[in-house]
Image (tube, grey):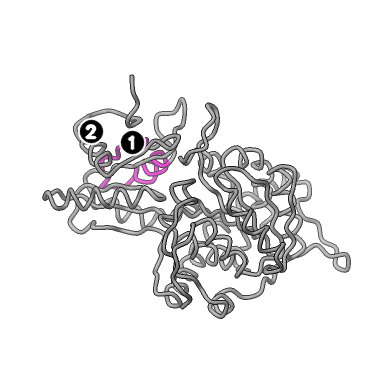
Amino acid sequence: MGKKVGIEVSIAASDAVGLCDVDVVAAYPITPQTHVVEHLAELVADGRLDAEFVPVESEHSAMSVCCGSAAVGARTFTATSAQGLALMAEIVFIASSMRLPIVMFLANRALSAPLSIWNDHSDTMMVRDCGWIQVFCENGQEVYDSIFHAFRVAEDPLVSLPVMINVDGFTLTHVIEPIEFWTKEMVQKYLPPFQPLYRLHPDKVVSMGAFGMPEIYAEQKMAHDQALLASASVIKKAWDEQGELTGRKYSPVELYRTEGADTLILAMGSICETASLAVDKMREDGRKVGLVKLRLWRPLPFTELRKILSCAKDVLVLDRAISPGAANAPVTTEIRALMYHEPQRPNIHCMIAGLGGRDVTAADVTKMLETVLSEKDVEYRIYGVRG
């Protein structure tokens, strides 16, 4: 195992990308993603990373470059946030449909307007159906480890799909945390050289992203969906092997103090650490409350979730994004649909919290739970809204 140091999470993520020996980095700077690509540019400029750093004129161009580089067989990385992802979205859908194993670091940030540089999950929920594998990180060590896992999964010949690593902007990206680094030998043992299934090459001509007539479009979409669902086994296996290598075990769904709990809180990202503090306090007070940490957002681990949530009487979903004009927020919508036909279906409550970076404390989480349990027939509530 490598050394353990206190370092900014964005810088640690960049160092992990460097250890993966990427061939191409194409990105456009946007807060709070900028430190990631700035450090990668430094690594390339200083000769510490033998890669092409392409300083494009927009995020749309960044993903376009990534598609081109991945299509010719280059290990490819990019990063973005919020409005950058919005501008990039057209090509994000193309990348997954063409089965290009790109890895993207998404520094989650609220979408404008009004202009906000702070964290919530509105950007990633905008593209939740883009066909990428999508993972949420709780802390800095998990962000660092997820870089290696993402390349391992994306490039597996049984997968060949892009991976999006969701990292809460500022809440994680700009904080200094103790990170246990990998050695180069560990990376080489875990991450094999990239061997693409297909690549653009003048000596062996293939077509990628060709026109899809109505007679084949539905079949292609079904094949894409089946490939994404099938990637779950590779994702789990790669996490298991990473656990053997590092001693840190990750899984699609992680449970915290759920033994005997009749009330569960379900959350994603860094708010899970805050929620765990709330659970600790409520457990001390004799309340049967547990926490479900949803790490793998796509493909959604529906079998595991159904088994876990069926044991509860009430489930509070902490959503970090709003669906204007809808009856629910994005994650709550998924969970309610998931449990609809279950014979033992819990009461699923929705609380939208932390929009635009508004602070959420452990006491807030407790208050949210008390609020939804005391109210009936309330579809959702935005916590902390004044007026």
Determine which quarter of the picture holds residue 25: bottom right
Q: Which mark is residue 48?
A: none
> Which sits in the foreground, 38 or 188?
38
- What residue is disc 1 on? 351
Residue at left 33%, top 19%? 387
Determine which quarter of the picture holds residue 133: bottom right
Q: Which mark is residue 371?
A: 2
Q: Is residue 133 above or below residue 239?
A: above
Q: Is residue 340 magenta?
A: yes
**Is residue 55 rendered to the left or right of residue 298?**
right
Label 2: which secondary element: helix
Q: Earlier in the sequence, mark 2 or mark 1?
A: 1
Q: Are marks 2 and 1 in contact (CB under 8 Å)?
A: yes
Amino acid at dot 1: Met
Determine which quarter of the picture holds residue 308: bottom left
Residue at left 63%, top 49%? 221
Residue at left 67%, top 71%? 194
> Which sits in the foreground, 245 or 349?
245
**Is residue 349 rendered to the left or right of residue 218?**
left
Residue at left 29%, top 48%? 275
| Mark 1 neighbour density, 10 Å: few (under 14) some (14–19) many (20 or more) | many
Q: Is residue 228 above or below residue 4?
A: above
**Farthest residue, direction right:** 203
Q: Is residue 14 magenta?
A: no
User: Start and end of the magenta stretch?
Assistant: 331-353
